């Protein structure tokens, strides 16, 4: 009986080892997939950083373009105001000295 029990025990161990080997092979495949996904995520992260940098640059240019008309009207207003004040000052000086 002991030989049979040993034989049955060895057979069970062999089946268990085969099952564990199959699981190990599956885990190795999953590990390879995870590694590939990790490398892809690193690439995507780098691309996102580059895209964010480009977007920031575009945003700064858009803000500059949006503020340009306001600066133009400021210059026009200052010029008109200066012209009017110079005219008034000229008129006053002409009356005073004239």
Image: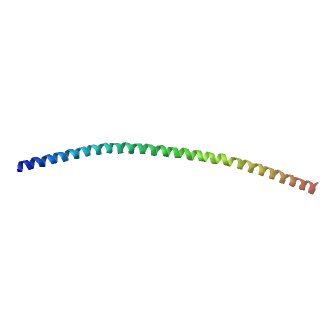
**Of residues 55 and 33, the one drawn nearer to the viewer in this rendering:** 33
How many labels were placed on the picture?
A: 0
82 with respect to 38 (left or right): right
**Of residues 37 and 7, the one drawn nearer to the viewer in this rendering:** 7
Where residue 86 appears, x then y in whole percent?
84, 52
Name the quadrant of the C terminus. bottom right
Residue at image position (69%, 47%) is 68
Q: Which residue, as the protein is rendered here, is positioned at the far right? A: 98
Where residue 63 appears, x then y in whole percent?
63, 48
43 with respect to 17 (left or right): right
Residue at image position (82%, 50%) is 83
Residue at image position (87%, 54%) is 88
Where residue 21 appears, x then y in whole percent?
23, 44
**Of residues 86 and 38, the one drawn nearer to the viewer in this rendering:** 38
Residue at image position (10%, 46%) is 7
Q: Which residue, as the protein is rendered here, is positioned at the far bottom? A: 96
Q: How is the image coloured?
A: rainbow
* In the depicted structure, whether residue 96 falls above or below residue 10: below
**Of residues 1 and 18, the one drawn nearer to the viewer in this rendering:** 1
Where residue 77 appears, x then y in whole percent?
77, 51
């Amino acid at each position: 009986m002991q030989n049979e029990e040993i034989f049955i025990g060895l057979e069970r161990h062999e089946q268990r080892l085969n099952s564990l080997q199959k699981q190990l092979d599956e885990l190795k495949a999953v590990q390879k997939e995870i590694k590939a996904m990790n490398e892809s995520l690193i690439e995507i992260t780098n691309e996102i950083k580059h895209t964010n940098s480009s977007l920031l640059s575009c945003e700064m240019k858009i803000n500059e373009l949006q503020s340009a008309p306001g600066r133009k009207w400021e210059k026009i207003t200052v010029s008109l105001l200066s012209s009017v004040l110079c005219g008034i000052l000229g008129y006053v000086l002409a009356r005073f000295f004239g």
